[in-house]
Image: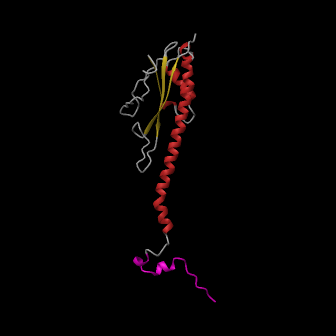
Amino acid sequence: MSVNVRSPDWNCKQAHLLASLGQCSAGGVVIEFAMLAPLFIGLIMASLQVGLLYLSQQGLETAAEDTSRLVLTGQSQNAAQTAAQFKTSACAALPPYLSCSKLYVDITTASSFANATLTPPTFTYDSSGNVTNTFNYSTGSRNSIVVLRLMYIMPVVDIPFGLKMSNAGGGKRLIMATAVFKNEIYS
């Protein structure tokens, strides 16, 4: 006795192509996956990129908090730290996944808290894509109001479907941590 086993889509193969389009469901899952997979992958990429940006921003904020104490308490001034030495201290406070070569430090004094400059600078680049800006390094003296800005240029991937993560051009994003404080009366 022989049993005739038919595949589930046997009727789809036998029917006329145009007449069976609305009735045949063979391959429907593949087509649905092909339509939704790019959106799903884009959503995952965007979520990972935003998570990495938030993690990097928090690491930069922590580094700004740690290094601002060097200026606030007069340790940087008493040690006569140069801008390069201070940047080395800031780099030591960065999380290990952030590179010191992409960190920029700007320290200025202000006459009052209302006059403190908090806006991000406009970065300029040479033909090789290197930053050409020069930043201030003025830690002030006792009772000076100081604005410390740590800026980090992070490479990002622009996500498909129009989600642009870059704000500094060339697939890069500027993240910045700012601390405004009044120096202690140190000796």
Name the quarter where the N terminus is drawn: bottom right
Q: Compared with residue 64, is residue 156 higher up or lower down, i.e. above or below?
A: below
Q: Horizontal and vertical percent for residue 171? A: 42, 41
Which residue lies most toward the front here?
A: 114
Q: Nearer the viewer, residue 69 or 7?
A: 69
Q: Is 8 a magenta residue?
A: yes
Q: Horizontal and vertical percent for residue 71? A: 54, 18
Which residue lies most toward the left here?
A: 127
* Total marks in image: 0
Q: Compared with residue 186, is residue 156 higher up or lower down, i.e. above or below?
A: below
Q: Horizontal and vertical percent for residue 55? A: 55, 38
Which residue lies most toward the top here?
A: 187
> Would you identify the image quadrant in which residue 125 lies?
top left
Q: Is 146 a magenta residue?
A: no
Q: Compared with residue 1, is residue 46 higher up or lower down, i.e. above or below?
A: above
Point 50% across, 43% down: residue: 50
Chain part drawn in magenta: 1-20
Name the quarter where the C terminus is drawn: top right
Q: Nearer the viewer, residue 17 or 145?
A: 145
**Display colour scheme:** secondary structure
Q: Horizontal and vertical percent for residue 72? A: 55, 18
Which residue lies most toward the right here?
A: 1
Point 47% across, 36% down: residue: 154
Q: Compared with residue 139, is residue 51 higher up or lower down, i.e. above or below?
A: below
